[in-house]
Image: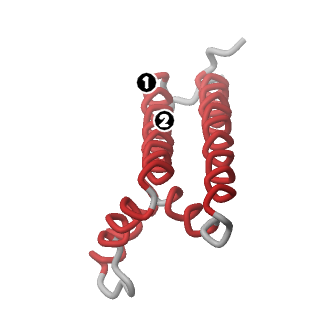
Amino acid sequence: MTHPIISVELIEWFELFFSYIIMAQLSYGFLVLILGATIIEYYEWGIFRPARTNFQKATNFFLKSIIGIGPYFYYRYSNYSFLKSKIYYMGTLISMVILGFFLIGCIRVIGKILVGTLR
């Protein structure tokens, strides 16, 4: 049974959208791993603290949803020694890559079930 609103193209666009979000997060995460505090400063320049207007809130939401996972884990691991924090951060990024592939696979399977092309 197929849904009239959901098509193969819509599922592919949805899959691409999430793939791009995951790629942006991981790319920025690897930049944070390599450049450290330098790239975090650029991220901090784009964040409004405190966000008072709707524009500032929308900008914060956009930045945090597109590239915010790298700085989050950078701050989370910053209280460890340099080497230990880099190892934890690298492990987190590798886990995120594996989780990203898994999520994209789940989206693909759910989409095929909804469209009715999975037998």
The amino acid type of the residue labelled 2 equals Ser
Mark 1 packing: few (<14 Cα in 10 Å), some, or many (20+)? few
Q: What kind of element bears circle 2?
A: helix
Task: Work out whether 91 lies above or below 75.
Answer: above
Q: Quadrant of the C terminus?
A: top right
Residue at image coords 50%, 32%:
15
| Residue 91 vertical placement versus 46 (above, below) | above
The residue under the point 57% across, 30% down is: 3
* Residue 9 badge: 1
Q: Is residue 82 left or right of residue 39?
A: right
According to the picture, the residue beneath numbered tag 2 turns out to be: 19
Looking at marks 2 and 1 on the same chain, the residue that comes earlier in the sequence is marked by: 1
x, y (%) of residue 13? 42, 31
Q: Residue at x 66, y 65 (%)?
A: 81
Image location of residue 8, percent across then percent down: 49, 22
- Can you name the residue that lies furthest to the right here? 119
Task: State the image coordinates of residue 6 (x, y, percent, origin top left).
Answer: 51, 31
> What residue is at 65 percent from the left and 72 percent from the top?
79
Depth order, front residue of 106/97? 97
Residue found farthest to the top: 119
> Is 63 placed left or right of 71 in the picture?
left
Query: Is residue 51 rendered to the left or right of residue 77?
Result: left
Mark 2 to mark 1: distance in Å?
15 Å
Please tell me which residue lies in front, 103 or 116: 103
Tell me if residue 60 comes above or below residue 70 in the rendering: below
Q: Quadrant of the N terminus?
A: top right
